[in-house]
Image (cartoon, grey):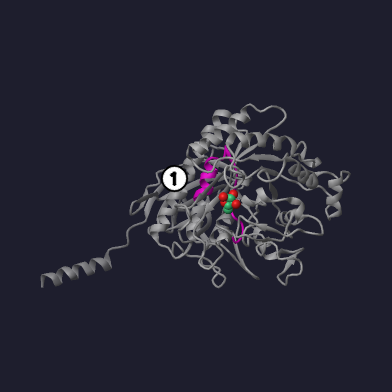
């Protein structure tokens, strides 16, 4: 009888006890305190000749029955235009240090091999003109990585002359004969890629001697880029946080400090993937809370890495003239079963959306030094924006995060103070929330708040000073499961939906769903 009673009481309690109240997090934002500009280039993309990133993802050729403009997919262009891609880094990656531009211009293209990525043939049908046409169609700038590993300074110098010289030079005339009379704009120049590894396994000192030569002789002749819009030269930087990498940053930055009139750099690249452990073995779909929390823990290491290398840069460049370009970042997981392992094919889930938001927030908090970043990679490879299969296309959860963050492009950072609290799962403890704020170019205030906790909602109360808030609304992105994905058959599983907030007494309050990314604007 007694046990029956206990059972009955427990049952009643289960039915009548309300679900745990949402966790409460208070943010404090003084809109009159402004920080650095969040450079739109932190929303850059990376397109390497790798798997179906270029071929099929962008280039299908003019004869394809898939709608295209001069061989470039219209659906992909439309989607990328909508996220205002600031720049595209091309042609690699490791591929860049084996790329010889001449094979990819003119009516006759050489067929070569792509030994880095699956050993497949490289038709070179997507070359300089096709890349420039593509970025022109999507409205992005060119970030061209020249071949330092297996090329020569002369080859790179001639490529730049071919792209940027006005017609009277022989190379300029050749470009015109190949269909483009006006010089191309090259906004960003990568001097090699991972020269410490796939780019030639150089020592830092050896790289610096190469970097100086390339910086000096690889010139941009575009008349429009001489005084204004000057091409920024990005040197190879670190790929981790151990002594090998800190020594590399020291060596390059020390050389920069002593640079003379004859050479210069404007940026130092940094590569950091969220892998969990190497080789990549975390599944990109079909995982649970354990893998969700572990990968997010791992991605937050970006903060320490940037702080560490920024501190070294500060020693040699206290005025922060050299930008840190995180020009390869994102989740790198096990290849999807049945795919060519050299093609780096993976799914893109709600976890990736949260991972993207966390990294973008880290970049924004370091906006004074981090003025460029390129997620790897734009289409069909690693943490892609877009996945295609023949005529089909699907936009990933990461794509939607980039779309939601549009107001942060070139916005002014505003510090947010908050006690995030903790979400714990097993041995993993993560901040429950993350948040940034910024004023857009029209002076409107925007907040981004991520709820990392996959189980509990969060009640956010943002105290605002420096502005009189009247209303607030925006979009939130979540999905049923941490590994929810969009597929060709179900394209809308992970999509932003509208969210509104309450504004009262200088406070904005809103309820965040578990595992969600939210962006709201505040009307004054
Ligand atoms: O993005 C894939 C590869 O990762 C790039 O080619 C290389 O730079 C990095 O190691």
Res 115 quadrant in image: bottom right
Location of residue 3 (image quadrant): bottom left
In the image: residue 140, left or right of residue 303: right
Q: Quadrant of the N terminus?
A: bottom left
User: Picture quarter containing residue 320?
Assistant: top right
Helix, strand, or loop for circle 1?
Answer: strand
Residue 375, given in percent of the width and then of the height, sits at 58, 52
Of 54 and 153, nearer the camera is: 153
Expressed as whole percent of the image width and height from the top left, the position of residue 366 reads 54, 40
Query: Looking at this view, is 105 or 406 the one in front?
Result: 105
| Rendered residue at 48%/40% (across/down) | 241
Query: Magenta span covers which residues?
Result: 358-380
Give 486 or 455, whichever is nearer the viewer: 486
Residue corresponding to mark 1: 27
Farthest residue to the right: give it. 168
Q: Is residue 67 above or below residue 171?
A: below
Q: Sort mark 1 into few (<14), some (14-19) or many (20+) by Cα contacts within 10 Å.
A: many
Q: Give how far across and how far down residue 503 sits, in percent.
A: 48, 51
**Residue 36 pos. (x, y %):** 58, 38
């Amino acid at each position: 009888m007694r046990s029956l009673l206990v059972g009955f009481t427990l049952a009643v309690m289960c039915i009548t006890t309300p679900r745990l109240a949402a966790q409460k997090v208070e943010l404090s934002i003084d809109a009159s305190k402004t920080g650095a500009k969040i450079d739109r280039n932190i929303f850059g993309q990376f397109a390497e000749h790798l798997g179906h990133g270029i071929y099929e993802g962008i280039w299908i050729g003019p004869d394809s029955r898939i709608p295209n403009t001069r061989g470039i997919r219209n659906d992909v262009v439309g989607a990328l235009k909508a996220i205002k891609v600031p720049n595209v880094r091309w042609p690699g990656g490791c591929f860049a240090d084996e790329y010889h531009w001449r094979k990819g211009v003119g009516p006759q293209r050489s067929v070569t091999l792509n030994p880095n990525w699956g050993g497949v043939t490289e038709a070179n049908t997507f070359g300089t003109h096709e890349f420039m046409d593509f970025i022109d169609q999507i409205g992005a700038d060119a970030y061209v990585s020249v071949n330092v590993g297996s090329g020569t300074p002369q080859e790179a110098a001639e490529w730049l002359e071919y792209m940027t010289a006005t017609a009277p030079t022989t190379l300029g005339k050749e470009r015109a004969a190949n269909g483009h009379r006006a010089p191309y704009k090259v906004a960003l120049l990568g001097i090699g890629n991972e020269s410490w590894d796939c780019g030639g396994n150089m020592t830092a000192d050896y790289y610096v001697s190469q970097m100086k030569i390339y910086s000096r002789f690889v010139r941009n002749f575009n008349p429009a880029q001489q005084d204004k819009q000057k091409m920024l030269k990005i040197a190879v930087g670190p790929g981790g946080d151990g002594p090998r990498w800190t020594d590399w940053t020291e060596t390059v930055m020390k050389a920069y400090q002593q640079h003379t009139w004859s050479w210069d750099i404007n940026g130092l690249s940094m590569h950091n993937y969220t892998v969990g452990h190497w080789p990549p073995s975390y599944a990109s779909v079909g995982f649970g809370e354990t893998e969700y929390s572990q990968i997010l823990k791992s991605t937050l290491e970006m903060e320490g890495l940037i702080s560490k290398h920024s501190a070294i840069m500060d020693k040699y460049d206290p005025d922060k003239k050299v930008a840190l370009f995180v020009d390869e970042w994102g989740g790198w997981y096990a290849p999807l079963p049945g795919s060519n392992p050299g093609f780096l094919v993976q799914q893109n889930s709600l976890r990736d959306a949260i991972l993207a938001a966390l990294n973008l927030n880290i970049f924004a908090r370091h906006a004074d030094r981090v003025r460029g970043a390129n997620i790897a990679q734009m289409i069909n490879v690693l943490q892609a924006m877009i996945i295609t299969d023949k005529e089909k296309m699907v936009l990933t959860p990461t794509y939607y995060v980039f779309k939601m963050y549009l107001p942060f492009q070139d916005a002014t950072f505003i510090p947010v103070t908050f006690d995030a609290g903790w979400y714990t799962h097993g041995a993993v403890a993560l901040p429950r929330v993350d948040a940034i704020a910024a004023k857009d170019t029209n002076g409107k205030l925007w907040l981004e708040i991520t709820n990392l906790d996959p189980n509990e909602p969060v009640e956010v109360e943002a105290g605002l000073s420096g502005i009189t808030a009247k209303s607030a609304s925006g979009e939130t992105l979540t999905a049923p499961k941490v590994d929810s994905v969009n597929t060709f058959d179900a394209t809308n599983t992970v999509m932003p939906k509208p969210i509104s907030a309450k504004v009262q007494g200088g406070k904005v309050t809103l309820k965040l769903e578990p595992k969600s990314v939210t962006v709201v604007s505040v009307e004054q």
